Image (tube, grey):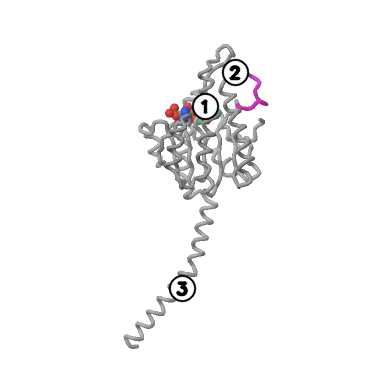
Amino acid sequence: MTIRDNQLLVGKFLSSLAAAILCISPLANAQTDAKDATGPTRHTVLITGANRGIGLELARQYAAAGWRVIGTARKPESAEELGATGAKVMQLDVTDQASVDRLVQDLANQPIDMLINNAGIQPLMWKLDEVDFDEFERALSVNAVGPVRVTRGLVPNLRSGKVRKVINITTNLSSIAENTEGGFYGYRESKAALNMFNKSLAVELGPDGFICIVLNPGWVRTDLGGPKAPLSVEESVSGMRRVIENLSPEDNGSFWTHDGKQMAW
Ligand code: NDP
């Protein structure tokens, strides 16, 4: 074989290789897309109130499962534990429209697959006489109005994501059907309003493939839940992740417990 023959052979080999790569690459893309659509890898979740408690554990577990996590904190400068999970830490006070607008602007054009409205407060007011109206209004602002502000701002990002789930963290205390003991003024009303928001959201966005649910984490040992709660954050969050993972379109608008049971409204 002459040098020229060798050059021709190498040329032929390179052009067949290029053709083979061209043929294979759409398949390779399809496989990557299929993997993205079915597995958690490279999906993005935004979790509010992620600097402590249930939100922090959600950030930990989703990051460990390979998700890209955006965790929000009112004071990002002191959210070291959240930063240590690998999450991107962003400032957000859900009661402050300017703070929500800043977050939305900073995330413009970035797809978000799932939003978890977790930030919440629990005023402790047992009797009507004990109701402090500032605290009552604060609970409505954080627990009910806050998720509406955040969700409205992020719907464009969620539309460009692949998963289209909105998870609103509620409580068993929001259930009117199960309220036999009364009390918890302000907390019960604010979370019942969150449940109703979820229902309207589900009706509005369901036709576009969204699944919006309210999810009760159970009674969990956090600053809010206190030391006597039976569940650890790890148990509650792994249960909630299982519920979220198994959701199907017919679950849109439903009310779940962390251990996979439907709750009465
Ligand atoms: P924690 O009190 O431990 O954490 C609450 C989180 O919400 C913190 O990150 C807090 O931030 C954040 N937050 C409070 N106000 C705002 C605000 N205005 N803007 C943004 N973030 C805010 O509570 P849990 O982790 O226990 O609760 C998480 C969710 O689970 C809540 O919605 C709660 O109602 C719900 N839940 C909890 C139960 C439990 O037993 N623990 C039971 C049922 C429901 P910061 O540190 O700045 O205050």
Does residue 74 show up magenta in the picture?
Answer: no
170 and 1: which is toward the camera: 170
Q: Which residue is mark 2?
A: 183
Identify the residue at image location x=54%, y=30%.
145
Q: Secondary structure at mark 2?
A: loop
Q: Secondary structure at mark 1?
A: helix
Identify the residue at image location x=35%, y=83%.
6
Q: Secondary structure at mark 3?
A: helix
Looking at the picture, does residue 259 appear above or below residue 43?
Answer: above
**Residue 198 seen by the camera:** yes
Crowding near pointer 1: few (<14 within 10 Å), some, many (20+)? many
User: Which residues make up the magenta segment?
Assistant: 174-184
User: Picture coordinates of residue 164 (x, y %)?
Assistant: 56, 45
Does residue 180 show up magenta in the picture?
Answer: yes
In the rendered image, which quarter contains the N terminus? bottom left
**Residue 220 seen by the camera:** no
In the rendered image, which quarter contains the C terminus? top right
Q: Which residue is mark 3?
A: 19
Q: CA distance from mark 2 to mark 1?
A: 19 Å
Of callouts 2 and 3, the N-terminal one: 3
The amino acid type found where label 3 is placed reads Ala
* Picture disc at residue 48: none
User: Picture coordinates of residue 226 (x, y %)?
Assistant: 49, 23
Q: Which residue is mark 1?
A: 141
Looking at the picture, does residue 260 appear above or below residue 22?
Answer: above
